[in-house]
Image (cartoon, coloured by chain):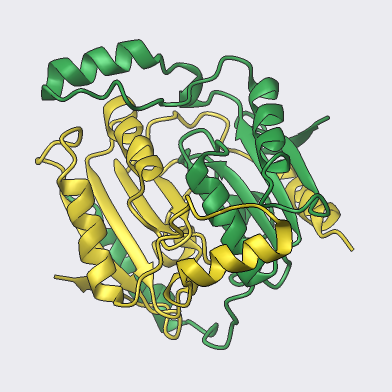
Chain colours: A yellow, B green
Amino acid sequence: MSVIPDLLAANGRYAERFDKEELPAAPRRRVAILTCMDARLVPSRFLGLEEGDAHVICNAGGRATDDALRSLIISYRLLGTREFLVIHHTDCGAMSVDNEELWERLRRETGADASGIDFLPFRDLEASVREDVAAIRDSPLIPLTIPVRGFVYEVETGRLREVG
Amino acid sequence: MSVIPDLLAANGRYAERFDKEELPAAPRRRVAILTCMDARLVPSRFLGLEEGDAHVICNAGGRATDDALRSLIISYRLLGTREFLVIHHTDCGAMSVDNEELWERLRRETGADASGIDFLPFRDLEASVREDVAAIRDSPLIPLTIPVRGFVYEVETGRLREVG
């Protein structure tokens, strides 16, 4: 049973009451958020964002990968964002990933060699936030004038806490 | 003027009425969506998603990069998603990016060499959707049993249209 018909029906209702046709591409609040793809995290809700407010970049873990850096560079150079947030979260799937186990499982289930892929697991949540904040700060392509702040989102409470 | 205090105040209000503490990590609707970080796109709104429903992966352009594939592999292998959507959009910033221009600008503004980074611009919106759907389908690490459907989101109307 596909859920796509339901999603498209919801989109039809959204489009019927749509009144955002005049929004510019540049985020109004000049902020970009890097966070996890986790289904429990809905950044627009837990940060109070409206359409047009902020760039939201999401991957497994909310990690500062080369692709996330590509996106952040486009965000600030071409679309004028001036602050970045990195948000990881409690009970993250990336905390239970083990590269070797996953490579072995993929080899067994698909026959393909995935050992070139680092799935970017982490064990220490605060350390992973600090590491990704540092990776962004250390990029020579992102100016030091851009504040980069790190947070943990608690899936148990809906609350953000800053990682100092 | 930082907008972060405003975002944290909004998060405080969200946490006060939070009632999602029991949600599992596996997306309830078993779907993963790959789309653009654009501020005008709020997937939870335009697809009618609640907390816990779906993985949402976002980068500049909604491109099927190695990092997006890493996230999709984790999504279906470890967290049970069974359908993927790729959603690009009209008026996308990636349509006005030019690699050579951006490399030159970054060299001028930061002194750093960015020429190793493909910013993944595209000119033809439907073609870019088809290309990224194909990149996911062609991955030996993603089974052919997972439907991958491509869409364009119209920022002028809020409406999705499928790319066949």
Which is nearer the eye, B79 or A80? B79
The answer to whether residue B14 is seen in the rendering is: yes
Q: How many marks?
A: 0
Report x, y in % for residue A142: 19, 36
The answer to whether residue B42 is seen in the rendering is: no
Q: Quadrant of residue B111?
A: top left
Q: Residue furthest right?
A: A1
Above or below: residue B8 compared with residue B84: below
> What residue do we see at 81% from left, 53% from top?
A4
- Left or right of B144: which side holds B156? left
- Left or right of B52: which side holds A36? left
> What residue do we see at 45% from left, 80% from top?
A91
Which is nearer the eye, B55 or A121? A121
- Left or right of A7: which side holds A95? left
Q: Quadrant of the N terminus of chain A?
A: bottom right
Q: Residue furthest bottom?
A: B22
> What residue do we see at 31% from left, 17% from top?
B102
Report x, y in % for residue B140: 69, 47
Report x, y in % for residue B159: 71, 37
Report x, y in % for residue A130: 20, 64
> What residue do we see at 39% from left, 79% from top?
A154
- Left or right of B102: which side holds A59? right
Q: Quadrant of the C terminus of chain A?
A: bottom left
Which is nearer the eye, B51 or B108? B108
